[in-house]
Image (cartoon, rainbow, N blue to C red):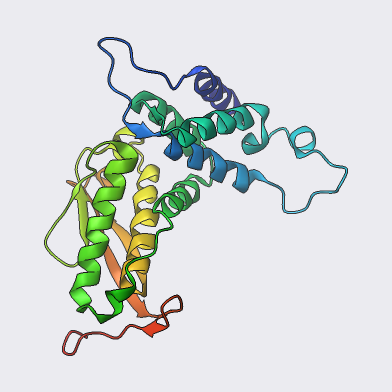
Amino acid sequence: MRGEIACYVQDLEYSRVTEPAAGELPLRISALVALTLLEVIRCQDAPTEVLESENPSHTMPRRLGLSGVIDRQIRRYHEEADSGGRISDDEFRDLVRLVVRRSDSDDVFYQAGSILAGDDRPPGWRGGLPRSWGFSLARRRVRKRLVRLFGRRVGGFAAGPFMLEARTHLFVNADPGGAACHFLTGFCQVVLQRYRGRRATVVHSLCESRQDALCRWTVFAEERVPDEAHRLIFNPEPGTG
């Protein structure tokens, strides 16, 4: 297992964010996606306690996120993300394969999706809107943000308040085992919480990795919470429950 991981790390180090050669697929995925995945890995692998004189990269060499290779890749992706750079689908798949070999891969993808949902604040006037409009704003945000990050649409919304569906999509193609789908679970949950003013529980109810016909992310439950930024408390519309 360690040999396989080392092989993928080496492939990742020698991959380049450059303009594609003639006949190659265009670079479509934001370098910010790659940067976020590696930063989450580094955070996961950081020790909870470190002595002042201790160098974790020397004392904990087995932790992938603290290796020199990962550090160099993070610096490289940081520069590319700052300049609006993009990576190829093949390079994204290499990153996904690197993550899925970890025991905490589900959590890494979930956290990366949560972070990449963005830190923008919804309009301050959303508190006066009908309940259904919050879902509409969240769906619009998910569509636009995913296109911006991945250079393509990732699925589409079916009928209902919030039901994202996708077939043979980027994540399941990169990871047939389904762990990478947790990226969209975290992504959708954060967007819904911001635009609905509630604690949304998004579930990946169907997955092609489980032999379902498609992947589906939908709202399982909501809990009313105050919006501290705008000093509002969101209540259900009369008759909607």
Residue ID at (38%, 50%): 182
Where residue 39 sits, quadrant-wise, is top right
Quarter location, residue 58: top right
**Quadrant of the image containing the C terminus:** bottom left
Residue 200: x and y in percent read 35, 69
Q: Quadrant of the N terminus?
A: top right
Residue 24, relative to residue 59: is it above or below? above
Image location of residue 63, percent across then percent down:
66, 37
Do we see residue 138 in this rendering? yes
Identify the residue shown where x is 53% and y is 47%: 104
Q: Nearer the viewer, residue 34 or 57?
A: 34
The residue sitting at the top extreme is: 22
| Residue ranking furthest to the left | 159
- The percent coordinates of residue 60 (x first, y second) are 75, 37
Q: Is residue 215 above or below residue 92?
A: below
Residue 209 visible in the current orientation: no
Query: Which residue corresponds to the image point at 41% horizontal and 19% vertical from the top-left?
Result: 18
Residue 36 horizontal side relative to residue 72, left or right = left
Q: Is residue 46 left or right of residue 52?
A: left
Q: Residue furthest bottom?
A: 238
* For residue 68, side relative to residue 80 (left or right): right
Examine the image and state in which quarter residue 218 appears: bottom left
**As drawn, is 172 to the left or to the right of 164?**
right
The structure residue drawn at horizontal position 43% and vertical position 39%, both measured from the top left corner, is 33
